[in-house]
Image: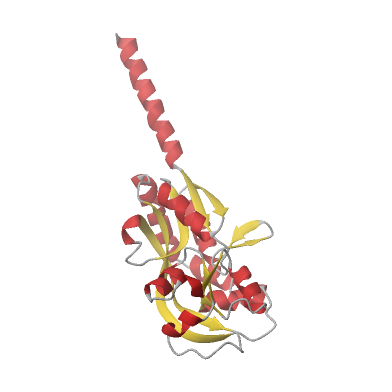
Amino acid sequence: MFWKSRLIRSIGLCYILLGSAGAAELTVYTEESAPYHFTQDGRVVGIATDMLRLACERAKLDCIIRMMPWARAYAQTLQTPNTLIYSMVRNPAREKDFLWISPIATESMWIYGRPDSPEIKSIADLKTMRTGVINGSSGLAFLQKAGVPASAMDLANSTELNFRKLAADRIQFLVSTESRMQTELTRFELPFAIAKRIKLQDATTYFAMNRQSDPALVRALRQALASVASDKAMGEIKAKYQAK
């Protein structure tokens, strides 16, 4: 009977080790949105990406980052345990759907327009215009809540596509934050000067995880991201991606 008892304990230990090994892998989803996360020479880089990679290294986690359209990334994280999405704007509508791991940045979200776009004085004026918005984004949700109809919004999966539509006069305005706009203008050239029109809101972005994720994994990542945010590495990361 003694050997049976030892065999049972050994099998149990194997399951524990396998479970621990599985918990050390984290699948991460994000979109193209410089300077926080974008593809460069076939690799995902950016301020938030570098923060995450360093945190995963410190926590000894195997983080697999996958680039995809925002709406798909959102759905994948919402449905799958042990997954993370960034950069996610934290707002009341999303609060209970995710675990909020660590803040990334707080920025102002604006409506930007072509130089020949009609004058607008309030969000209500957008109801008769054409505004480019990232599908599934907080900007889209904000405009919907403000009463802007679906017919007045043109959905896209990337800022680059919105830039192309703006240049072709297919849309008159687009939604973006200041830092993203500044960086994107160094990557994608527009044939005219784009201008701020209306401030929508201040928003804080986060690393967010599926609510059913392994608590040990969540705890390890939280601690690692907190350590990254509090040391000199953050200054070096931000300086690396400052728009020139």
Residue for point 42% across, 41% down: 23
The answer to whether residue 181 shows anywhere in this view is yes
Q: Nearer the viewer, residue 124 or 72?
A: 124
Across and down, in percent, residue 210 comes to 39, 51
Across and down, in percent, residue 19 comes to 40, 35
Q: Nearer the viewer, residue 50 or 179?
A: 179
Q: As drawn, is 36 to the left or to the right of 89?
A: right
Q: Nearer the viewer, residue 14 or 43?
A: 43
Residue for point 49% across, 72% down: 151
Q: Nearer the viewer, residue 200 or 118?
A: 118
Q: As drawn, is 45 to the left or to the right of 150?
A: right
Number of numbered discs: 0
Q: In the rendered view, tell whether residue 11 sits above or below residue 204.
A: above
Q: As drawn, is 127 to the left or to the right of 68?
A: left
Residue for point 67% across, 74% down: 188
Quadrant assignment, res 181 = bottom right
> Which of the colour schemes (rainbow, by chain, secondary structure, one colour) is used?
secondary structure
The answer to whether residue 230 shows anywhere in this view is no
Q: In the rendered view, tell whether residue 5 sits above or below residue 177.
A: above
Across and down, in percent, residue 11 comes to 38, 22
Quadrant of the frame with the C terminus: bottom right
Quadrant of the frame with the N terminus: top left
Across and down, in percent, residue 124 comes to 42, 83
Q: In the rendered view, tell whether residue 79 sits above or below residue 225.
A: above
Residue for point 43% across, 80% down: 200
